[in-house]
Amino acid sequence: MPLLTLAEVETLARAAHDGQTDKAGRPYAEHLAAVAGGVRARGGDPDQIAAAWLHDAVEDAALSEEWLAAAGLTARTKAIVRALTKEPGESQEAYAARILATPGALLVKEADLAHNADPERLAVLPEPVRTRLTGKYDRMRALLGLRP
């Protein structure tokens, strides 16, 4: 099976998340584009950029694990997407350990956290939600050894 191009991965991810919005009510594809751009800006390679576009697809049930297994993606991209797919009930510690154990996943999660914790994005949320999410993102950064 031929590998999907980054443009094809982007198109697929945008279609898979079509109609979904983030916590601020913005189209979810904006988050995916920001994470992919953040990975690119941090020197990420094509596998990591593809994973950035797909990082929430399985977790959000936008695409299935069966789709991912059969997709024209490198084994590394698939491994990164799986590492970034938080399982229901999974502890933050177990999730962070899997990310740290998967080559290439930390950079994608760093870009994801950077966009999630963007003060402009958080500013539009109600104070209790903003406080809860800020704490969650800070804790994940600490578990991953990332600077605040």
Image: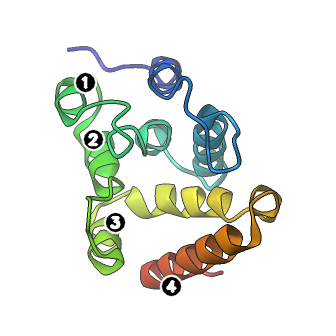
What is the CA distance from the residue labelled 2 to the residue labelled 4? Answer: 25 Å
Q: Label 3 vs label 4: CA separation? A: 13 Å
Instruction: Give the label on residue 99, or none.
Output: 3
At label 1, the amino acid type is: Ala
Task: Identify residue type, mark 4.
Answer: Ala
* Residue beneath disc 2: 78
Task: Judge the density around disc 4: few (<14), some (14-19), many (≥20) Cα neighbours within 10 Å.
Answer: few
Amino acid marked by disc 2: Lys
Q: Is residue 10 left or right of residue 120?
A: left
> In the image, what residue occupies the spot 26% across and 75% down?
94
* Number of other residues with Cα within 10 Å of mark 1, as a class: few under 14, some 14 to 19, many 20 or more: some
> On the image, numbered disc 4 is attached to which residue?
142
Q: In which quarter of the image is residue 75?
A: top left
Q: Distance between the residues labelled 2 and 3?
A: 13 Å
**Quadrant in the picture for the C terminus:** bottom right
Label number found at residue 71: 1
Q: At 39% from the left edge and 42% from the top edge, which residue is drawn?
A: 60
Choose the circle earlier in sequence order: 2 or 3: 2
Q: Where is residue 118 in the image (x, y as percent from the top left)?
A: 74, 62
Residue type at tag 3: Ile
Location of residue 36 in the rendering, given as x and y in whole percent from the top left corner? 58, 42
Q: What element carries label 3?
A: helix
Asked if disc 2 and disc 1 are in contact, CB closer than 8 Å, the reply is yes
Q: Is residue 9 above or below residue 58?
A: above
